[in-house]
Amino acid sequence: MAMTTNRREGNILVADDEKTMRELLARALLSRGFTVETAANGAEALEKIREQPFDMLITDLLMPNIVGMELIQQARKILPDLIVIVITGNATLETAIQALKQGAYDYITKPFDPELIIPVIERGLEKLHLRQKNAELEQVTKKLQEIEQIKSDLLDTITHEFSTPIAIIKAYIDMFLDGHFDMSNPRHLDSLRSIRSAVVRLERLVMNLLTLSMGKGTNFELKKEKIFIQDIISNALSQLNEDITKKNINVILNIEPHLPPIDADPSKLSIAVLNLLDNAVKFNKTGGIIRISASQLKSKSIGVAISDTGIGIPEEKIEEIYSPFTQVDMSSTREHQGTGLGLTVAKTIIEAHNGKITLKSKIGKGSTFIFVLAC
């Protein structure tokens, strides 16, 4: 039987084979606003405990089917935080100690005035709520500590990402200002290319940070128009051409002809595709392969797959790679000149277009990112 009145914190199960005592106690609790369930024996009580999370069990020790001690033991296996108050007419010091050892909060002898048990119940529930609050605070504290550590690691990586290209730019500018520059010298032209490459790295980093910042707020506006995914892919490849050439990566395209246009923000989708391809280049091996395919799906959408032959990602870490504050391996992103933000940004943009992105990866074999957008 379930009873409730003006809601008060505390879901209580009263288990007693004496109907009069059971109902008197239930009415007293009900009048105080608690949610109350009753059980006429241990088996019925245990069944109800399996069905819902009670805060407190008030139980007699001597009942049919399952005796009180066994009920307490089994109930606390199911609900470890359950507050248990024992009531019995056959009280002895030995049974009291045994009940307390089984995890009972208090022990009350019959007969008693049901109203007098209310303060005991309230103290027991207060203990439970304090325990729950402490557990919640511990979890929050632990999470905040993790976030602070992750932010610190991320800041270190971003600082590294800024300082490296800035140092390159400064060194070459100093060389030019000192008059050591000759446009006819191929090595000096290479220096200019290095400057441009460093600036591009900074530009991408700032672009990703800005996109991520907008994606977490309310101002992530999409300026959609009809565009072709093959144009987005081609543009991204052209931006990465120098990096692809440096690593001698073979790019294999398999773009289905006559693909229909998609309704998307060309600027933001370009950022997403650029980040996915940049990831495929960055974490690929020298002389590796990148395969890019695009096709129309039966669901009136375009599916794009970007595969590489790089280092791969452990299966248990796949979900983590999309979190801006949880890099799979900060040393790995540092080694491969990355912040770990690119994939987060790509996912944010694709999902803002109501698209879906998935990843298949195997350590040492490479990764395949697949995203789907509506036509």
Image (tube, helix red, strand yellow):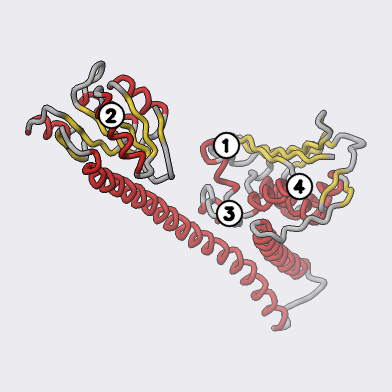
Q: Amino acid at mark 2?
A: Arg
**Residue 300 picture quarter:** top right
For the C terminus, the quadrant is: top right
Front: mark 2 or 1: 2
Specify which label sits upstream in the sequence, 2 or 4: 2
State the mark number for residue 22: 2
Specify which label sits upstream in the sequence, 2 or 1: 2
Q: Do the numbered discs 3 and 1 sit on residues whose CB atoms are within 8 Å?
A: no
Residue 17 screen position, x and y as percent? 25, 22
State the mark number for residue 335: none
Q: How many marks?
A: 4
Label 2 neighbourhood size at 10 Å, few (<14), some (14-19), many (20+)?
many
Residue where numbered disc 4 is placed: 353
Q: CA distance from mark 3 to mark 2?
A: 55 Å
Specify which label sits upstream in the sequence, 3 or 2: 2
Q: CA distance from mark 2 to mark 4?
A: 59 Å
For the N terminus, the quadrant is: top left
Q: Do the numbered discs 1 and 4 sit on residues whose CB atoms are within 8 Å?
A: no
State the mark number for residue 364: 1
- The single residue placed furthest to the top in the displayed view is 65
Residue 247 screen position, x and y as percent? 69, 49
Residue 256 vertical position relative to residue 325 in the rendered view, above or below = above
Element carrying mark 2:
helix
Residue where numbered disc 3 is placed: 324
